[in-house]
Image (cartoon, rainbow, N blue to C red):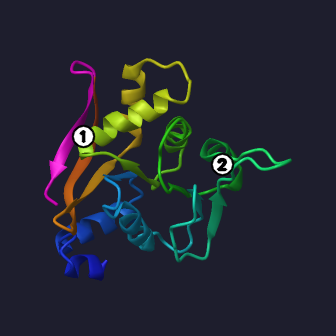
Amino acid sequence: MADLIEKGTLSAKTAELLGEMVTNRQNILISGGTGSGKTTLLNILADSIPDDERILLIEDTSELNIRKSNLVRFETRREQTGLPAVTVRDLLKAALRHRPDRIIVGEVRGGEAFDLLQALNTGHAGSFCTLHANSAGQAVTRFADCVLQSGIELPHRAIMANIGSAVDLLVHIGRTKGQRRVSEIAAMRGFDNERNECRLDALTP
């Protein structure tokens, strides 16, 4: 975290806020473009997780280097001769049998968003994931679109309401002129039924 502060990716105040959010078991969604530093930020935030908590990490390709002793690492597998594929959705469904305190998904790309949303709403507070998006607000829309890809027939309003109750904090990191910088932090304030949208409260990054 000290390196990110020194490089201007975020301020000391923001670093302290994010550390408190992790310790307080807030569900955090990190968004940004390709190469913006989402994975790096997630990896560093994981350092703030107490050592006695059991972490279950799910990735397509092993990228995160979480330095915790009570860590269970799951990785997807492509279909091979005589072996079926193992997807992120499969791993999320299996994750609950391993008694995790927190679930970390390296990147949400599709229908696994539904399974992650179910986990977040059933007692796995303090979980993280990353998502490709151009802003914190768009990350909510993108997450909802991924849930729809699961094939589960749910009204869009119900999906947005579930996201509003499951996600606590959105952090957007961008890359401008070669520099990575946390440009947005937004606290989730639930779902607005009248406007049919999640209410975000922008915090100073």
Say which amino acid is labelled 1.
Gly
Say which amino acid is labelled 2.
Leu
Q: Which residues are magenta?
A: 193-205
User: Residue 94 in the image: x percent, y percent?
Assistant: 70, 47
User: Residue 80 in the image: x percent, y percent?
Assistant: 77, 50
Secondary structure under badge 2?
helix
Graded by Cα atoms within 10 Å as few (under 14), some (14 to 19) or many (20 or more), the crowding at tag 1 reads some
Q: CA distance from mark 2 to mark 1?
A: 28 Å
Secondary structure under badge 1?
helix
Q: Residue furthest left?
A: 204
Where is residue 99, by image quadrant? bottom right
Q: Nearer the viewer, residue 115 or 150?
A: 150
Q: Nearer the viewer, residue 136 or 46?
A: 136
Q: Which residue is mark 1?
A: 137
Q: Which residue is mark 2?
A: 91
Where is residue 8, by image quadrant? bottom left
Please name the residue shown 34% across and 61% down the image: 35
* Residue 88 magenta-highlighted: no
Q: Quadrant of the N terminus?
A: bottom left
Q: Quadrant of the C terminus?
A: bottom left
* Mark with earlier residue (2, 1): 2
